[in-house]
Image (cartoon, grey):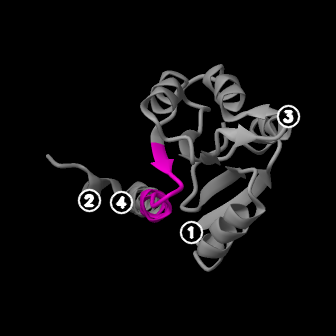
Amino acid sequence: MRPPTEQVRVYLAEDSAIILRLLAELFRDDDAINIVGHSSNAMSAITDVAALDPDVIVIDLALEHSNGFDVMKSIAKRDDEARPVVIVLSNYAAAPYREAARRLGADYFFDKNGGITELIKTIKSMVASRSASARTDRAPESRRSSG
C-alpha cells in the first residue's frame, strides 16, 4: 500500500461525459484533491483502480461493458488496508440498488439528482481529516501524547 499523503487521490468511474466533466471541474482548483484517472468503462475501471491505487473511487452503477456492481465486486476482493473508499453516485437510487451497493462495500451512496453537493462535501471532509491527521503525524512526540 502507498503511504498516505495530505492529497486525496480520486478515481472517477462515470458513463456520462457531462457528469465526468462537472466533477473534474469542481475538483480542479482544490490542491488537496487529485483526480488520478477516470473511465466510462467498467472493465477499464477495474484495471485502473488496481493499478492507480486511489484513496477514493466515485462510481456510477451504469457503466459501459458491465456495471458499477462488477467494479465494486473487484474492489471488495482487496484487503481492508488497500481498499479505497467507495462512493456511489447514480440515478439508480431506489432501495434495492442502495442495499446491493452497501452489500458490495459502498461506503456512501448519493443520488445524482441532488446528491452531487453532498458528494463534494464528503470528499472535502476526507481532505480535511487527512490534513489534520498529517499535521498530527508531523507533530513532536511530546505534543501528541496525552499523559
Would you name the residue on which mark 1 appears? 32
Residue type at the position of mark 1: Ala
Direction bottom: furthest residue: 29
Sequence-wise, the earlier of marks 1 and 4 is 1
**Residue at 72% from the left image edge and 66% from the top image edge:** 18
Look at the picture and state if 139 lies above or below 95. Answer: below
**Magenta residues?**
109-124
What numbered label is drawn on residue 143?
2
Q: Which mark is residue 142?
A: none
Label 4: state its secondary structure. Answer: loop
Residue under the point 79% across and 37% down: 42
Q: Secondary structure at mark 1?
A: loop
- Nearer the observer: mark 2 or 1; the answer is 1
Q: Quadrant of residue 65?
A: top right
* Numbered marks: total: 4
Say which residue label 3 marks: 65
Please tell me which of labels 3 and 2 falls first in the chain.
3
